[in-house]
Image: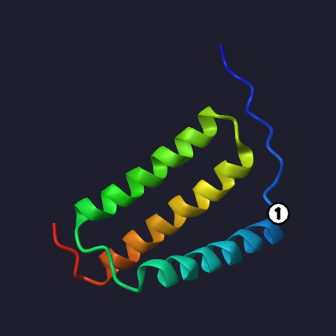
Amino acid sequence: MAFDPIIRPELQTEDLLRVLAQLKQKYNDRVDKHGPGILVSSHEILGVVVEEYDEVKAEVQANRLQGLHRELEDLAVACIVGMVSLRSGRVQW
């Protein structure tokens, strides 16, 4: 039996640009708080990402959409920092 595809509203470019601007600010806030240093190992990257993921999961389980947005920002920034850290070529296994 085939399922009907989910009909989803189209993503709006202005919403995407607003979120990207928020992520840039959130990244800058992270640098202000923790400094500009990279994450130095794959295990450190994983630890930061998993911690943020756990916070996203907690907000979903508590049905808190505003908190979910905030935690998704934190998770996205953690992933960005991890990716930039890897690109630096200085991450240890």
Furthest residue toward top: 1
Picture residue at 75% right of the left edge, 26% below the top: 4
- Quarter holding residue 7: top right
Percent position of residue 15, x then y: 80, 66
Picture residue at 80% right of the left edge, 69% below the top: 13
Q: Would you place residue 56 above or below residue 87 in this image?
A: above
Picture residue at 41% right of the left edge, 52% below the top: 51
Residue 35 relative to residue 13: left or right: left
Nearer the observer, 17 or 75? 75
- Quarter holding residue 36: bottom left
Residue 73 relative to residue 44: left or right: right
Percent position of residue 11, x then y: 78, 58
Percent position of residue 70, x then y: 64, 58
- Quarter holding residue 39: bottom left
SS category of the residue bearing label 1 = loop
Nearer the observer, 74 or 7? 74
Amino acid identity at mark 1: Gln
Picture residue at 24% right of the left edge, 82% below the top: 89
Residue where numbered disc 1 is placed = 12
Q: How many marks?
A: 1
Crowd rating for badge 1 (residues with CA inside 10 Å; few <14, some 14–19, many 20+): few
* Placement of the N terminus among the 4 image quadrants: top right
Residue 62 relative to residue 57: left or right: right
Q: Would you place residue 56 above or below residue 33 in this image?
A: above
* Placement of the C terminus among the 4 image quadrants: bottom left
Residue 20 relative to residue 28: left or right: right
Q: Would you place residue 50 above or below residue 25 in this image?
A: above
